[in-house]
Image (tube, helix red, strand yellow):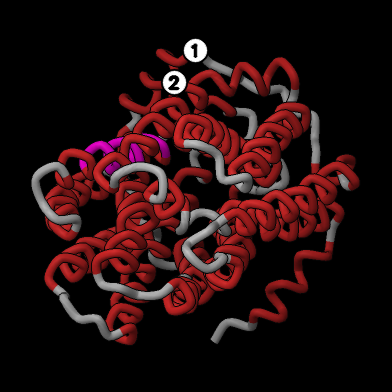
């Protein structure tokens, strides 16, 4: 059995690892800030517009995120990773503050989109910070620790958010709390800037050149589309599952907060062991197959299960995150064994799979909800997921 206490003690052995540890701690606070509103965004929007139009907010937000990410490497190359991160944090803080003020539908749309875009770009900055201190031989381990720390933030956030929601589904305190915690993240990065920020000569390629690199390299192509399918699942989990459970099945936010926190535990339990196993024994491919199969099975359960028992849904949600944790860690380990920190264009382009997955998922949601109840979206997604196995197949395993 792996000794986690010895594992984490290794973090302190060098200056580089101390830098990573600071980034791991910062990642917790960034995750809490991002996750606090994550599961209530759709419900906030639903208070202002009809449910079938909720997806349109996410379509526009993710379309603009996708476009912004395509040009973000040039921004990082010109101004530096730290400076661009500060700018995105400022935009995110302003957006969160105004969302907390319960704005009209028009301003809700504007500030939701700016919050969403800036939040995604901050995570690109964090990728570059972490990769600056990562060795290829320890990629799986380093990314696993990073995501485990980050997921600690995600686990506590749904419970905290559910306790901050005011009666009559008023969500303002959640967004104020998110802004406050983002300030803590900002303070950690700025006060430790000499330890977490390294000057790197970035290779910011043109968009067309980056796309060609991904398309010609079967490994990069496969990893990108596996990431796309993972984010297609996350879109349904973050946007439509809360609506379905809260509005259709009648679960209260106090119950949902506990369920959503428990369902994220696999990200803590699985990713570090999976990263170590991928580095030393199996490689990533087999665990990617297993993770995607679990996700597809969970989507079918979302459609077929009609129970209103919170224990039944808690078990299904927990099961789904086992698959998501496996796919997430194997994606990171596979990709960062190929790509180094100087390849900012490739790192950034992989992250475009996030808004692309949400864009396609939200667009599909708008289309499906125009004709069918929300649960049918999960059935269509499960069918689409069959194609994800092809992209795992074309990846060359590292073992």
Q: Residue at x 69, y 36 (%)?
A: 94
**Residues at circles 2 and 1 in contact by the CB criterion of under 8 Å:** yes
7 w.r.t. 213: above or below: below
Residue that carries the numbered disc 1 in the rendered image: 206
Question: Going by the image, does 302 lie left or right of 397?
Answer: left
Quick one: 270 or 356, which is closer to the camera?
A: 356
Please indicate, yes or no, whether residue 60 appears anywhere in the rendered image.
yes
Q: Which residues are magenta?
A: 355-364
Q: Position of residue 146 (x, y in %)?
A: 62, 58
- Residue 191 in the image: above or below residue 84: below
Which quadrant: the N terminus?
A: bottom right
Most frequent secondary structure within the magenta stretch: helix
Please say if 71 is above or below 163.
above
Find the distance from the CA under tag 2 to the CA under tag 1.
Answer: 6 Å
Q: Residue at x 53, y 18 (%)?
A: 71
Residue 189, image quadrant: top right
Q: Position of residue 393 (x, y in %)?
A: 22, 48
Instruction: Reply yes or no: does residue 342 show up in magenta.
Output: no
Residue found 77% across the figure and 73% down from its top: 9
State the image coordinates of residue 178 (x, y, percent, origin top left).
66, 54
* Res 210 label: 2
Q: Residue at x 40, y 23 (%)?
A: 213
Q: Position of residue 165 (x, y in %)?
A: 55, 65
Quadrant housing the C terminus: bottom left
For disc 1, the neighbor class at 10 Å (few under 14, some 14 to 19, many from 20) is few
């Amino acid at each position: 059995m792996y000794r986690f206490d010895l594992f984490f003690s290794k973090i302190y052995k060098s200056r580089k690892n101390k830098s990573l540890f600071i980034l791991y701690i910062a990642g917790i606070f960034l995750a809490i800030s991002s996750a606090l509103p994550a599961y209530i965004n759709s419900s906030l929007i639903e208070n202002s517009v009809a449910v079938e139009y909720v997806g349109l907010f996410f379509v526009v937000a993710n379309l603009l995120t996708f476009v912004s990410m395509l040009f973000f490497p040039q921004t990082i190359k010109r101004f530096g990773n730290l400076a661009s991160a500060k700018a995105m944090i400022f935009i995110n803080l302003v957006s969160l503050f105004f969302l907390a003020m319960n704005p009209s539908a028009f301003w809700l749309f504007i500030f939701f989109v700016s919050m969403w875009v800036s939040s995604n770009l901050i995570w690109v900055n964090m990728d570059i910070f972490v990769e600056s201190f990562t060795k290829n031989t320890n990629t799986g381990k380093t990314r696993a620790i990073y995501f485990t720390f980050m997921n600690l933030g995600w686990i506590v956030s749904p419970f905290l958010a559910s306790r901050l929601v005011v009666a009559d589904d008023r969500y303002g305190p959640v967004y104020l709390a998110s802004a406050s915690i983002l300030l803590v993240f900002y303070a950690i990065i700025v006060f430790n800037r000499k330890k977490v920020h390294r000057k790197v000569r970035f290779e910011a390629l043109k968009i067309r050149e980056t796309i060609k690199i991904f398309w010609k390299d079967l490994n990069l192509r496969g990893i990108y589309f596996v990431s796309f399918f993972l984010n297609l699942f996350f879109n349904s989990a973050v946007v439509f599952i809360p609506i379905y459970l809260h509005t259709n099945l009648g679960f209260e936010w106090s119950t949902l907060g506990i369920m959503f926190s428990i369902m994220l535990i696999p990200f803590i339990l699985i990713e570090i062991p999976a990263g170590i196993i991928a580095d030393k024994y199996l490689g990533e491919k087999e665990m990617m197959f297993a993770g995607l199969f679990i996700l597809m099975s969970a989507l079918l359960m979302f459609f077929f299960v009609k129970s209103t028992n919170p224990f039944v849904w808690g078990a299904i949600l927990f099961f789904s995150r086992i698959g998501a944790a496996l796919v997430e860690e194997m994606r990171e380990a596979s990709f960062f064994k190929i790509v180094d920190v100087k390849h900012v264009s490739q790192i950034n382009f992989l992250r475009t799979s996030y808004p692309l997955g949400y864009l396609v998922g939200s667009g599909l949601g708008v289309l499906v909800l125009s004709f069918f109840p929300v649960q049918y979206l999960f059935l269509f997604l499960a069918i689409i997921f069959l194609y994800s196995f092809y992209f795992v197949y074309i990846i060359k395993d590292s073992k």
